[in-house]
Amino acid sequence: ERLPGLLRAMPKAELHIHIEGTLEPEMIFALAQRNGLRLPYASVQELRSAYAFSNLQSFLDVYYAGASVLLHEQDFYDLARAYLARAARDKVLHAEIFFDPQTHTARGVAMETVVNGLHRACADARTESGISAALILCFLRHLSEASAFETLEQAGPLRDRIVGVGLDSSEQGHPPEKFARVFARCRELGLRLVAHAGEEGPPAYIWGALDALKVERIDHGVQAVHDAALMRRLAQERIALTVCPLSNHRLRVFPELAQHNLRQLLDAGLAATVNSDDPAYFGGYVNENFTQVFAATGLTVRHAYQLAFNSFEASFAGTAEKRAWE
Ligand code: ADE
Ligand code: ZN
């Protein structure tokens, strides 16, 4: 088959990747040792066997526990360097990397420790392999508006190291409207805006992300297919959806990967993209997401080209970079 080869070799941008979700079990053990921390797991295999999820929350509990081994600037640097090296092998030319500062600041890690480590990794990766990368600060939606404002305040001095903000964590019960004032302030600051919506939550949360938060892209968004008017709007405005097939499968959004609606989204004219979300937890980096969803759902070469095109078009890279990719 020539399709998997094309999928692996084609240049792409990755727009939905949580850096804490690239923390491989081996690195969790290595960082625990380096930082003198005890883990409640005896081995890498025992930890990996805990990666059997029934929904988003069951994953998040394990994901936040894993992230607790990240303490020092060098830890964040090493994590991001490892991801960017791995992404470059998948022909990712540009990555927009989410990070969750509140899960670190809550443990006493300073905002600047997180951002400086990640930023230095992006700069060094660019020098060494040419990959471009940008950072997107995500607010945890299960926490309060006040906590989000405090987080934004902490990021103020580091404003020029962040391209935008996002919204992630437990979706159900935490509608976008909860953060309307935070996002309005971010907009005034010139930050680009995205939000997770319609992963498990209803189409109303996608409407809320567009109308209350004024986001430019929707992370996941797969529940949009249940609302025809929303589908028309997403297509007409070319609002990108950063879809994560293996994540949706592992978190039981689609119990079988063959049921994934990526093809339906593309065929309706939506600007869908393929991404890996939390590859250390969901069994594959971006090329594995491409090859598995194509094999399971019968997507074609034409879809492959469209997905790669969409990823660059939807990115927040500058016009000079976009021209260089043409
Ligand atoms: N944080 C990391 N991965 C996430 C996901 N898939 N949904 C919501 N929050 C997340
Ligand atoms: Zn995500």
Image: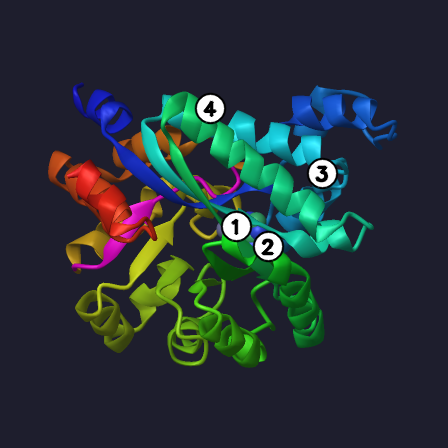
Percent across and percent down for residue 288 are: 38, 29
Of marks 3 and 4, which one's residue comes earlier in the chain?
3
In the rendered image, which residue does mark 4 sit on?
Answer: 85
Where does the image place residue 40, in percent across and percent down from the top left?
84, 32
Residue type, mark 4 in image: Ala
Residue 92 percent across, percent down from the top left = 34, 32
- Vertical placement of 233 versus 56: above or below? below
Say above or below: 226 vs 50: below
Q: Look at label 1 and name its amino acid.
A: Arg
To which residue does mark 3 refer? 66
Residue 6's quadrant in the figure?
Answer: top left
Compute the Cα span from label 3 to label 1: 25 Å
Q: Is there CB contact under 8 Å for labels 1 and 2?
A: yes
- Residue type, label 3: Gly
User: Where does the magenta region start and end?
Assistant: 269-280
Q: Position of residue 191 (x, y in %)?
A: 45, 64
